[in-house]
Image: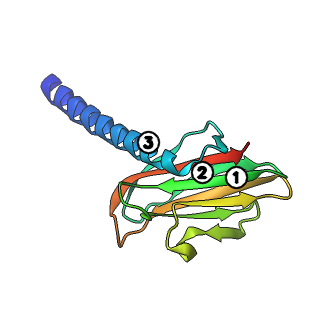
Amino acid sequence: MNKTIYLFFLLFSTLCYEALGQCDSTAYYATQYMQKNFVSDGQSYRALLFDDQIAEFHTTFYGGAKYRIVSFAGMDKNQLQFSLYDQEGNMLFSNKEYENSNYWDFEFKDTMEGRIEAMLDLTKQKSGCAVLLIGFER
C-alpha cells in the first residue's frame, strides 16, 4: 500500500514539475512582446488548459493609463485566444477578431475592473500553458 501511494506521489510530482516548467518557458517567450516602455503589473496570470477549458483572470485597469496585454501558449504564435470584459460582462475586445494577435494595447478613460478569459485555439493546439502578461506604459 505504501509503495502504491509513493509511486502515485512520485508520478504526480513529476507531472506537476513538467507542467510548471512548461509555463515558465512559455512565460519567458511571452516577455518578447512586452517592450521596454511597458512595465509588468507584477502578477502571474497562468493556467494549464486542456481542450475547451477557459481560464479566467481578474484585474483592475486604472483610468488614464495605457496597458498592453500579451497572450502566449507555446512556441508558435497566435495559439491563445483572449477576450476582455468589463464589470457588467460586456465584451470590450477579443483577439480572435485579429487572428489571435499575441498582444494588444488598451487605453482606459476611467478605472475599471476587468475580466480576461483565455482559451486555446483548438485548431492549433489541444493542451498547453496559457500565459498572460499585463503591463502599463511608463
Dot 2 lies on which element?
Answer: strand
Q: Residue 90 in the image: x percent, y percent?
A: 72, 69
Q: Earlier in the sequence, mark 2 or mark 3?
A: 3
Tag 3: amino acid: Tyr
Q: Which residue is mark 3?
A: 28
Numbered badge on residue 57: 2
Q: Position of residue 21 (x, y in %)?
A: 34, 38
User: Viewer-proximal residue, 6 or 62?
Assistant: 62
Q: Which mark is residue 30?
A: none
Q: Residues within 10 Å of mark 1 (few under 14, many from 20)?
A: many
Tell me the quarter of the image containing the C terminus. Answer: top right
Among numbered discs 1 and 3, the one appearing first in the sequence: 3
Direction from residue 74 to residue 118 in the image, left or right = right
Reading the image, the residue beneath label 1 is: 67
Q: Tag 2: residue type?
A: Phe
Quadrant for residue 121, please give it: bottom left
Q: Judge depth for marks 2 and 1 and give the one in front.
A: 1
Q: Is residue 109 left or right of residue 32?
A: right
Estimate the spatial distance between the alpha carbons at disc 2 and disc 3, rounded to whole Å: 19 Å
Residue 89, located in which quarter of the rendered image? bottom right
Separation of residues labelled 2 and 1 (CA atoms): 15 Å
Crowd class of label 2 (few under 14; some 14 to 19; many from 20; radius 10 Å): some
Residue 7, percent across and down? 17, 30
Which secondary structure, mark 1? strand
Rendered view: 81 above or below 16: below
For image coordinates 67% across by 59% down, the residue present is: 105
The kind of residue tagged 1 is Tyr
Closer to the camera in the image, 66 or 110:
66
